[in-house]
Amino acid sequence: MRAPVHTRRRLSAALACLGAIAVLIGVPLTYAGHVLGNSAQFSARATSLLNDPNIRSLIAQRVEEQAIASVRVPPPFQGAATKAVTKAVDAAVQTPAFHRVFDAAILDLHKSVFVSDSDTITLRLAHVGKLVVDEIHRVAPGVAAQIPPSVSHLMIHISGGNFAQATRAARAIERAHTEGVLLLIAGGIVFLLAIALAAERRRAARYVGIAILVDGVLLVAAYSIIRPVVLSRFAVGQDRSAATAVWNAFLSGLRSDAVILAVAGAVVAAVMFAIRPRRGSVSRGGPGRGGPTRRPPARGTTDMRV
């Protein structure tokens, strides 16, 4: 015996809500796990930061400090050596060779954090010394002759320190990627059940579309609120600009996914609103079941149909 219409309607609405919750949680988990757990994705996004002048300037500053400290030249050449190193570093960090070195260092960092479970974040740039020396030879050949050969083997440490809470949180999010994918699959199945069990499937599909639309809107709203709160913790100037570049490189895609989700839900809801049942037809088997209805015979006549 089939459940009453109002019971099936309530069950369908409840399933649509459950599916919406699953998708709302699953989308950010899947996105974050993919960005953090996939070494190629992580490296590509991190290396793209070199295109930002603020990030490039911060990196060049760290390289310059360590390069100058390692260059020991006679006193008459110290001023010229410092200027030459500054120019050489600024030029070196923009070269494709430095991008390759930076990419390799990011991959090594990713492995140490997500494979070796290291709580120390240290970006080691090998062979950067050779790039700097090559640039010094180009910009100041006279000074290059005074620089010891050991500088060519210099390894630069861009950042370092113990970030136990940050790395543990990153590993937890990365490991939640599978749960995020399962939530999305479960959400899709629950949405299909909400439609299949509904007494009026068109209306149920409309509610599913609205639920997906709400998910997208909530994710966009959360993104828009959290982003300025996080960035406000950085000092105004180069630090905040650099933090903004990092946020955009790693998290702007989440907002795009949320917008796509909202648009998809809106399209489904709009299509279901636009489709109307044909007049004169109801459900099979009579009123409410899809079959044609019979007109009652006129008064004073006899229905001769058998």
Image: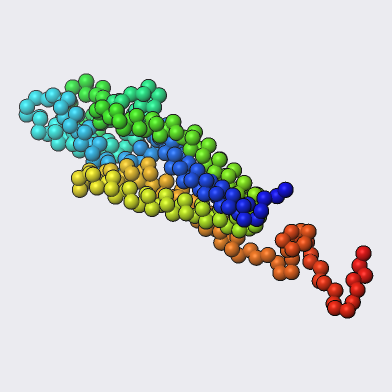
Query: Residue at left 74%, top 59%?
Result: 289
* Residue nearer the viewer, 127 or 182: 182
* Residue nearer the viewer, 270 or 303: 303
Query: Residue at left 72%, top 48%?
Result: 1
Residue 21, position as x, y percentages in the image:
48, 46
Query: Residue at left 6%, top 27%?
Result: 75
Q: Quadrant of residue 58?
A: top left
Report the coloring of the rendering.
Answer: rainbow
Q: Is residue 139 visible?
A: no
Q: Residue furthest bottom?
A: 300
Q: Residue furthest left?
A: 76
Q: Is residue 151 left or right of residue 202?
A: left
Q: Residue furthest top?
A: 150
Query: Residue at left 28%, top 48%?
Result: 229
Q: Where does the C terminus fall, quadrant-wise?
A: bottom right
**Count of marks placed on residues:** 0
Residue 92, position as x, y percentages in the image:
27, 35
Q: Is residue 199 above or below residue 109?
A: below
* Residue nearer the viewer, 244 or 76: 244
Q: Is residue 195 left or right of residue 302?
A: left
Q: Is residue 276 visible?
A: yes
Q: Is residue 111 left or right of residue 294?
A: left
Residue 233, position as x, y percentages in the image:
23, 44
Q: Is residue 109 above or below residue 208?
A: above
Q: Quadrant of residue 60?
A: top left
Q: Is residue 274 left or right of residue 210?
A: right
